[in-house]
């Protein structure tokens, strides 16, 4: 199965692998911005839909109109003296404001009033007007009071100051506009945009519950007729939703007037807009931080990758470098990749060097029998030797051919084993159980040499290819058998070296190996036994070393620590698996 290596994003249907990493990261950031804005819009929509400001205003306005009607029915439904000239004396308390009471000559006025004829109970205009103007003239809703004849007697709006106020506001706004900086203009623009969206959404929300626009007199008439509160919503000429609440001013179940409170239902909600812009500002700062961090991350990602690319190109182009190549040293995945590429490069170089040396060794080994064959053939062609010597030369000729044939077979076997090492499958084995099974299945040898085991009781597990490990053990035993006397023994010992390694030692009772040759014996085609050169190619220990090396272990010749087994002693050290 081919290994397809794509970029940062890896989909079967849509991939960015054809783009550079910088473009991929830019597109990812754009997706983040897009989805962030999408969720920001959704959040603002639910923020507006669930806003309680309008409900709170309606509740507040109902409480206020109840407060107005309660005050007026307790203080403004009175018998009014007919023909009274100074109405202010009705509300001036001489104990509280004695000076004003004296200035208005209220004592004489009250004496005069006491002689006047009083009207029936009615809603007194002066006190109602004073109460409304004093308490509701500066509010964002309008309060009007009508008597039972539908005549408006009080209005919280002040028409006389309207033009002056507007002029003052225009001048003030003009002055503020000159002093606004960029951030204030940005905030004001966002507030205007948010409030326009806020108005649009809520207008859609209340559009189904709107009443047909009607005059206030009709609402007053309906309130007087029903003797209960009336609430209506309608759309005015400025496309504003107006909420009107009316309540009767009653005493003894008789209506003496009506209080009407009206206000624009949807006003600018700057508090909600402030929450929204704070969230937007946080999102902008977050995106900015993400972009900055992405830039530094991208540089930290691309620079070492470019460095690895240049190193790979230099390695492939075989350009001679005067100094060592500097691989990126990091602790992340790029560092791991750099380390693995470096290891792979070293292994490839080592394999190339080994292949070159192996080729040289093969040429040397094949050259010897070919030289002998050539010399023998030349002597035979000269026909100057005796028949007896001819027979010896032919035998020698045949011997060298057999040696070449065996050598070529061993070389082929060596190449096959080296190839299998690269593709072998590993499994965890119990070394002690492995040797017990080995001894049980061992068929013996012509010299009647016995296999003895000295296995540590601990469970010794390691990760190996079982067939290749068996090949190593058989090769070492065959070597020991070849140099040992009849009816001797070979000892296999296993034990735990430390918490990371286990050791297997193989002892024999032969003549031993010169310890000065402990490194040479693992070289290809080396043998210290000339008498066995015709039947041994010297590749066995070299193959065994490569197999053990593939297990991340080691094999070496060591001095025997057992007096009974004073011959050769080979020590195999393997990684210990504890799980």
Image: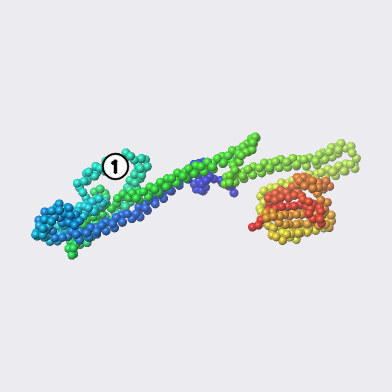
Tell me, yes or no, if residue 193 can be seen here: no
The extreme bottom residue here reads 252
Residue at the location (26% across, 42% down)? 170
In the depicted structure, whether residue 3 falls above or below residue 461:
above
Residue at the location (23% across, 55% down)? 261
Tell me, yes or no, if residue 94 can be seen here: yes
Q: In the figure, residue 405 lies in which quadrant?
A: top right
| Residue nearer the viewer, 545 or 304 | 304
In the depicted structure, whether residue 308 falls above or below residue 106:
above
Residue at the location (52% across, 43% down)? 297
The residue pinned by badge 1 equals 173
User: Residue 440 placed where, x, y %?
Assistant: 75, 61
User: Residue 155 placed where, x, y %?
Assistant: 20, 52
Q: Quadrant of the C terminus?
A: bottom right
159 sits to left or right of 469: left
Mark 1 closeness class: few <14, some 14–19, many ≥20 residues within 10 Å: few
How many numbered marks does the figure carry? 1
84 sits to left or right of 349: left
235 sits to left or right of 526: left
Residue at the location (84% across, 43% down)? 396
User: Residue 62 placed where, x, y %?
Assistant: 26, 58
User: Residue 413 placed where, x, y %?
Assistant: 73, 48
| Residue nearer the viewer, 98 or 242 | 98
Colour scheme shown: rainbow
| SS type, badge 1 | helix
């Amino acid at each position: 199965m081919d290994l397809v290596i794509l970029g940062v994003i890896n989909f079967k249907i849509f991939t960015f692998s054809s783009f550079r990493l910088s473009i991929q990261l830019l597109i990812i950031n754009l997706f983040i911005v897009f989805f962030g804005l999408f969720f920001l819009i959704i959040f603002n929509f639910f923020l507006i839909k669930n806003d309680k400001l309008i409900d709170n205003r309606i509740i507040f306005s109902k409480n206020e109109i109840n407060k107005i009607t309660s005050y007026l029915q307790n203080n403004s439904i009175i018998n009014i003296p007919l023909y009274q000239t100074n109405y202010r004396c009705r509300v001036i308390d001489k104990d509280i404001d004695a000076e004003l009471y004296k200035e208005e000559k209220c004592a004489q006025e009250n004496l005069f009033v006491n002689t006047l004829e009083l009207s029936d109970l009615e809603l007194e205009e002066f006190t109602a007007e004073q109460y409304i103007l004093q308490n509701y003239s500066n509010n964002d809703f309008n309060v009007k009071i009508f008597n039972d004849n539908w005549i408006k007697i009080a209005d919280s709006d002040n028409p006389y100051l309207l033009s002056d106020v507007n002029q003052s506001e225009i001048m003030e706004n003009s002055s503020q506009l000159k002093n606004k900086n960029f951030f204030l203009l940005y905030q004001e623009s966002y507030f205007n945009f948010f409030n326009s969206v806020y108005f649009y959404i809520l207008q859609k929300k209340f559009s189904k519950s709107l009443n047909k626009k009607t005059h206030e007199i009709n609402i007053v008439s309906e309130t007087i007729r029903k003797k209960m509160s009336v609430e209506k919503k309608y759309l005015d000429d400025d496309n504003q939703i107006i909420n009107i609440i009316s309540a009767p001013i009653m005493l003894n179940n008789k209506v003496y007037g009506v209080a009407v409170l009206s206000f624009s239902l949807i006003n600018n909600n700057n508090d909600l807009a402030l929450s929204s812009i704070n969230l937007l500002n946080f999102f902008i700062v977050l995106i900015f931080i993400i972009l900055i961090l992405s830039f530094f991350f991208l540089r930290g990602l691309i620079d070492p990758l470019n460095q690895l690319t240049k190193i790979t190109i230099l390695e492939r182009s075989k350009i001679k470098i005067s100094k060592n190549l500097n691989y990126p040293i990091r602790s992340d995945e790029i560092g791991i990749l750099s380390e693995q590429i470096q290891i792979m490069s070293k292994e490839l170089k080592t394999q190339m060097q080994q292949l070159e040396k192996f080729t040289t060794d093969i040429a040397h080994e094949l050259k010897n029998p070919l030289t002998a064959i050539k010399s023998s053939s030349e002597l035979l062609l000269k026909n100057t030797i005796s028949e007896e010597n001819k027979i010896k030369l032919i035998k020698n000729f045949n011997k060298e051919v057999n040696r070449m044939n065996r050598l070529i077979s061993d070389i082929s076997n060596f190449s096959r084993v080296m190839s299998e090492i690269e593709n072998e499958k590993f499994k965890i084995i119990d070394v002690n159980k492995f040797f017990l099974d080995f001894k049980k299945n061992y068929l013996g040898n012509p010299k009647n040499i016995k296999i003895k085991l000295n296995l540590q009781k601990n469970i010794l597990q390691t990760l190996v290819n079982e067939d290749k490990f068996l090949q190593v053990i058989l090769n070492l035993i065959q070597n020991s058998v070849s140099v040992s006397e009849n009816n001797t023994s070979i000892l296999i010992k296993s034990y735990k070296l430390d918490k990371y390694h286990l050791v297997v030692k193989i002892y024999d009772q032969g003549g031993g190996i010169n310890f000065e040759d402990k490194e040479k014996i693992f070289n290809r085609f080396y043998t210290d036994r000339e008498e066995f050169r015709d039947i041994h190619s010297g590749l066995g220990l070299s193959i065994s070393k490569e197999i053990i090396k593939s297990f991340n272990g080691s094999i070496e010749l060591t001095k025997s620590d057992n007096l009974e087994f004073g011959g050769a002693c080979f020590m195999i050290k393997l990684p210990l698996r504890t799980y």
